[in-house]
Amino acid sequence: TTLDENKTITITSYSEDGNVNSVIKGKVLNDHFLMATQGTLSLENIIFDGNNLEDSLAGVSMEEGTKINLNNNAIIQNFKNTSSSGGGVRARKDAVVNINGGIIRNNEALYDAGLQTTQGVIINFSEGEITNNKSTDSTIGSAAGVALNGGIFTMTGGKIENNESVQSAGALYVGNYADGSIGEAHLLGGIIQNNKANNGGAIYVQKSILNVEGTEISKNNTTNNGGAIFNNGTVNLKLGLISNNTATNGGAVFNHSSESILNVENITISENTASKEGGAIYNKGVMLVTSGSISKNTSIAGGGGGIYSLEGKVTINGGSIFNNISKTGGGGIFNSTKSTMEIKNGKVYSNTAATGGGGILNYGILNISGGDIYSNKADGGAGVDGGSGSQITMTGGTIFNNHATISGGGVGVYAQSAYTSTFTLNGGTIKNNTATSNSGGISVTGAGTYTRRTGVVCGNTPSNSYETSTTCPS
């Protein structure tokens, strides 16, 4: 059916028993089940059912400049496109999609199975569900739930759940269009959960912008990177909860490249798991933490229970990183090779590593000018541990009350003979740390070196020659 008048058309159903009636697809059409070329289409209390018949186009098509309102109990389901993109709904240039209690479910396409858009489309999602849609093509970047290509998506309520893409973006793809226009997604409320993809279990960002400002993103899974979010654009985590997501790398977020920007503000990132590196976040781009919490995340075979950074740049200017676990090194943070990290403020505490760096394990460049690193546990370098190639400079802040089961309760510095590892103390305080074996404050072994210009080392047990005072500042 084609609607081609510039009017507002409402399609609904009436049933004396209160049931919602269905319009069921009876044969293969090689065409859209319903298409609007002009005006506004409002659906309520009606089911459009594709009957799982294999066809070559989306079930509902909204052409350029049109509007669709999916109101209460408007359901688009069971459309199966085996030839191209778009399963349930396709919205073209400058169309508007309002989901106010409607449901898009059980649709399938090669890619962009639930709701597909092109440039300039505006989607407002306040209530309803986008669920159980599936994209099947492993060779094309795709979304199972919503594909935003150069438009604006605003979510204030509802659920996007149980969608699956064999490639990327189980729930939401935020990308640019061929003309260069970027996508913008604003997640202000609602829940995105139980989605699955090869990369970006819930969300994949490509040269576009994602703002998370209140939505819960939980229980999503990827077989590769970014259990909740895979970022190749700009992601601002301002408010909300990202929890219980799983991935190989980056249980919650994978910040993909040098051009990827990740800002962590007043958000909670907790109880995510990576089977390798970065229980919460794997960073290869530019990352800024100003507030919020990263807690109770786990990395299993790799390092960085909270944050793992490789060839990236990280600035920590606030927030708390605590109660994270690494089954290897870097319980709170693993700053790996060719990475630069600066800690200006914030807290890194009560993290645990099986080997080195309960708080922070460093193989790159680490500058500590403020903040507190305390109550972390590891075999060595319980507060901060520097491995081969590490450069650590401390000009401020406090490292205290950390415990090593072997040595270096506060700071450990180690390098193999072919490498260097340096720790320069130019300020700050290292105090009241403990080690079971030796060197409660600072441990220097192998080819590691330690230089002190200013700063206080005191009250550590067992003590050694690096202690500067018998009394500690309060």
Image: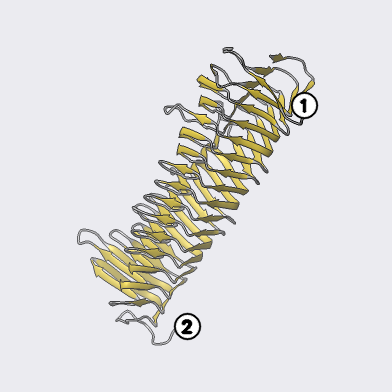
**Secondary element at tag 1:** loop
Quadrant (top left, top right, bottom left, bottom right) of the N terminus: top right
Q: Is residue 121 above or below residue 427?
A: above
Task: Describe residue 229's horizontal placement relative to residue 411 as left or right.
Answer: right
Whether residue 407 is visible, yes or no, is: no
**x then y, percent, for residue 136:** 46, 27
Which tag is nearer the camera, tag 2 or tag 1? 1
Q: Amino acid at mark 2?
A: Pro
The residue pinned by badge 1 equals: 15
Identify the residue at horizontal 63%, vertical 23% (top origin). Answer: 49
Q: Could you tell me residue 253's position as x and y percent?
A: 48, 47
Residue under numbered circle 2: 473
Cα distance, mark 2 to mark 1? Answer: 78 Å
The residue under the point 53% across, 61% down is 317
User: Residue visible at 40% across and 61% down?
Assistant: 331
Q: Is residue 10 visible?
A: yes
User: Residue 463 in the image: x percent, y percent?
Assistant: 32, 82
Q: Nearer the viewer, residue 354 or 382?
A: 354
295 lies above or below 439: above
Q: Position of residue 140 (x, y in %)?
A: 45, 27
At label 1, which amino acid type do we have?
Ser
Viewer-proximal residue among 414 and 46? 46
- Residue 163 lies left or right of residue 335; in this view the side is right
Q: Residues within 10 Å of mark 2 (few under 14, many from 20)?
A: few
